[in-house]
Amino acid sequence: MVLVDSSAWIEFLRPQGRLDVTMGVDGLLHEYEALLCGPVKLEVLGNARREDRKPLGEFFSNLPYRAMSDPDWGLAQENAWKLRDQGLSVPWVDVLIATLALEWGCRVYSTDKHFELMRDELGLALYEPGVGGKFNPQNG
């Protein structure tokens, strides 16, 4: 499974979103590999236009979803400290999403540069789609 970050979902959902990202998300959906978590769901749905909220919520309700547990907050806090001690300031929600991916053993698909920073510091595996956006089971 690949935990799809809100930045990739937003590109996928935009009428003029980046084609490479749109194809990458589409490839994950086609192979049933796109994973959703609470923080990403909140980021996307919480910022959705009123008319998009219900259809988007219904769309998300059909995706594989994994809930976080209470200990995940403590692990995210430790990762935030580790990043801060290295001089990196990363938004807490990105640290939380990265922590969940690390705990669940999955890759993250994102266009947000913060995840590249966390890849190096936390050992986070990032997803790169295959040719034409097809699912790539090998990278990361």
Image (cartoon, rainbow, N blue to C red):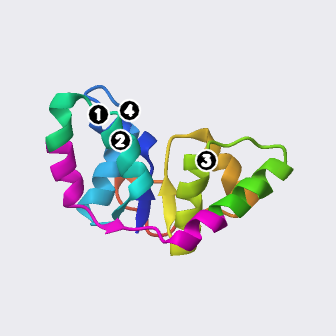
Residue visible at 45% across and 49% down?
A: 5
Q: Which residue is mark 2?
A: 44
Question: Which numbered disc, 1 or 3, marks the residue that appears first in the sequence?
Answer: 1
Q: Label 2 sits on what residue type?
A: Val
Q: Which residue is mark 4?
A: 18
Q: Label 3 sits on what residue type?
A: Trp
- Label 4, label 1: how far apart the Cα atoms are: 18 Å
Q: Residues within 10 Å of mark 3 (few under 14, many from 20)?
A: few
**Residue that protrudes farthest toward the top in the picture:** 16
Q: Which residue is mark 1?
A: 48
Q: Label 4 sits on what residue type?
A: Arg
Residue visible at 15% across and 51% down?
A: 58
The answer to whether marks 4 and 2 mark residues whose Cβ atoms lie closer than 8 Å is no
- Label 4, label 3: how far apart the Cα atoms are: 25 Å
Choose between 70 and 5: the one closer to the eye.
Answer: 70
- Label 3, label 2: how far apart the Cα atoms are: 16 Å
Q: Where does residue 73 sit, x and y in percent of width and height? A: 59, 63
Closer to the camera: disc 4 or disc 1? 1
- Based on the picture, tell me whether residue 73 belongs to the magenta stretch: yes
Choose between 47 and 88: the one closer to the eye.
Answer: 47
Q: Is residue 25 visible?
A: yes
Q: Where does residue 64 sit, x and y in percent of width and height? A: 29, 66
Question: Please, is residue 99 above or below residue 50 in the view?
Answer: below
Question: Please, is residue 108 above or below residue 67 in the view?
Answer: above
Q: Which residue is mark 3?
A: 92
